[in-house]
Image (cartoon, rainbow, N blue to C red):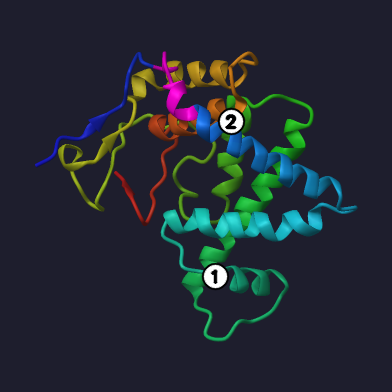
């Protein structure tokens, strides 16, 4: 049996992100973002393009959590329509996706005035959990128990990954917040990717998922 991978305590942020391998990718990624930014700047009302894109992103992201609703069904339900053969589970899935959109808009508004912070992360989690799966998992609060990721119902020794222990979580989140607001990193996209991976590794909130069991 394969041993679980445990959180890299004391090794964040990484000392060497292996820049030689990343450099060929950084240029392409930044060029793509520049084209996207140019496209948005040419549109009088950018929300016309951004609204369906954020819905699509929410649909794709929520599939990781085990949802099965399509983008078309979400849009029709949001508009007050009744897609044929829509089930209550799909309505629940659509509610989660709409929460993603509400939360994203709220975070964008806050980030216009304040930097990314733990307070904002907790607020985002609270909004995401309103009325959906996880609403009873202390929304907006960090977990106080050990969790792990693996097949549903697995024991910790059968897990694929074990996040940071709860007694180290506060310090881990403090380190993440400090790194998020470092403004002299060599490349912002790489910094963002590291923030994303570290947040997933910390797995700071107590919530169950359908696709992966966070036990």
| Location of residue 104 with respect to 110 vertically, above or below | below
Label 1 neighbourhood size at 10 Å, few (<14), some (14-19), many (20+)?
Answer: some
Q: Position of residue 23 (x, y in %)?
A: 52, 27
Inspect the magenta stretch and tell me whether residue 20 lies in it.
yes
Q: Is residue 55 left or right of residue 146?
A: right
Q: Earlier in the sequence, mark 2 or mark 1?
A: 1
| Location of residue 57 with respect to 205 vertically, above or below | below
Q: Which residue is mark 2?
A: 189
Residue at the (79%, 44%) spot, across then down: 38
Inspect the magenta stretch and tell me whether residue 214 lies in it.
no
Check the image and name the residue furthest to the left.
1
Residue at the (65%, 73%) spot, across then down: 77
As rendered, which of 25 and 63 lies closer to the eye? 25
Dividing the picture into quarters, in which one does residue 79 lie? bottom right
Q: Is residue 51 left or right of residue 55?
A: right
Rounded to the nearest angstrom, the CA distance separating label 2 from label 1 is 29 Å
Q: Position of residue 6 (x, y in %)?
A: 26, 28
Q: Which residue is mark 1?
A: 70
Query: Which stretch did the figure color magenta?
Result: 12-22
As rendered, which of 25 and 117 lies closer to the eye? 25
As rendered, which of 102 and 126 lies closer to the eye? 102
């Amino acid at each position: 049996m394969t041993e679980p991978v445990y959180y890299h305590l004391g090794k964040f942020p990484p000392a060497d992100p292996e820049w030689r391998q990343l450099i060929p990718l950084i240029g392409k990624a930044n060029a793509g973002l520049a084209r996207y930014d140019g496209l948005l700047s040419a549109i009088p009302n950018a929300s016309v393009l951004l609204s369906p894109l954020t819905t699509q992103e929410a649909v794709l992201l929520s599939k990781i959590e085990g949802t099965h609703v399509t983008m078309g069904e979400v849009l029709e339900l949001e508009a007050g329509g009744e897609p044929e053969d829509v089930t209550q589970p799909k309505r629940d899935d659509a509610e989660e996706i709409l929460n993603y959109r509400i939360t994203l808009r709220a975070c964008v508004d806050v980030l216009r005035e304040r930097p990314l912070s733990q307070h904002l992360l907790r607020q985002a989690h609270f909004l995401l959990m309103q009325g959906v799966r996880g609403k009873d998992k202390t929304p907006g609060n960090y977990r106080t128990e050990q969790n792990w990721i693996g097949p549903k119902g697995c024991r910790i020794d059968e897990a694929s990954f074990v996040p940071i222990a709860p007694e180290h979580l506060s310090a881990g989140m403090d380190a993440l917040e400090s790194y998020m607001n470092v403004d002299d990193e060599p490349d912002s996209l790489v910094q963002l990717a590291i923030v994303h991976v570290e947040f997933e590794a910390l797995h700071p909130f107590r919530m169950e998922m359908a696709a992966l069991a966070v036990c």
